[in-house]
Amino acid sequence: MIIDVHAHWGPWFFTMDVAAANLATMDRYGIDRAIVSATEAVIYDAPAGNRALAKVLEEQDRLYGYITINPRRPREAERDLRELLPSGRWVGVKIHTDYSGSPVTSPRLRDALAMAAEAGLPALVHTWGASVLDLAQVCLDTPGLRVIAGHMGADGFEHAIEAANACDRLYLEPCWSHAPAGRIARVVAAVDDRQLLFGTDATLIDPSSAFGAVAAAGLTGETAERVAWRNAAALFAI
């Protein structure tokens, strides 16, 4: 069983050949379930993208949805949570700090994460460099909040180790367009394996990148199962 906690649905704005169908990509790599955000919602229009994805989720039981929140538009976010959550197909919140112009240290971002906590949803947040430390602090300051550090800080993975050890409600997922030798192995050796998840960034990045990086870490036994699916199943109640 494999659960991908960082995936996307919909076309990207790059001139590139991406998979036309999420399920075809999942089948190619043996991914059983994926939690996806709408590309349109992340980079352009959150309500429109969320509602386009809602129609897809009605027909695809292997896909679960992130409701994308733009911290600069809290009323839209509140409405989307109120209207979309009852379907039962949405299991988390997605916030991209760069596209929304809302760094982790901003009051807007804190308010958006408080909204996710109130709704009882884990939040996948884009992190890069030392921002993962700021995310850990927001998590500590917000009762009930559970956050996933998307890309586990990318080149700031050493900061991600510190962040995860500081807050047991902060989870790490590894996808990144680079794969430095030993990155994932170092994180696994230093962090409680109940805080580790698997993500690919499909369809923006081919899943082979994440699979290769995780395979190189040589995970075995219970840790391998927790990373592949058990932690995600528990976190998202799927």
Image (cartoon, rainbow, N blue to C red):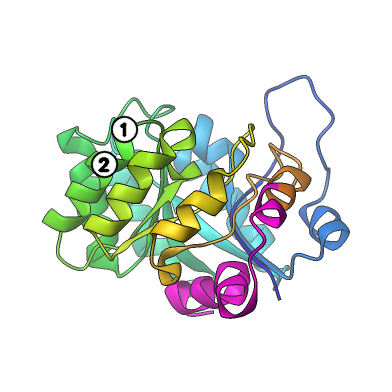
Magenta span has 94?
A: no
At 31% from the left edge and 34% from the top edge, which residue is drawn? Answer: 131
Residue type at mark 2 is Leu
Q: What residue did someone put label 1 on?
A: 130
Q: Residue furthest top?
A: 15
233 vs 42: above or below: below
Residue 74 visible from this viewpoint: no
Say what secondary structure mark 1 lies in: loop
* 196 or 192: nearer the viewer: 192
Residue 203 place in picture, x, y as percent: 72, 43
- Where is the C terminus found, in terms of image quarters? bottom right
Question: Is residue 233 located in the magenta-colored stretch of the structure?
Answer: yes
Q: Nearer the viewer, residue 128 or 50?
A: 128
Magenta segment, which residues? 213-238
Asked where in the image residue 190 lies, by quadrant, the reply is bottom left
Could you say which quadrant of the image residue 179 lies in? top right
Disc 1 to disc 2: CB gap under 8 Å? yes
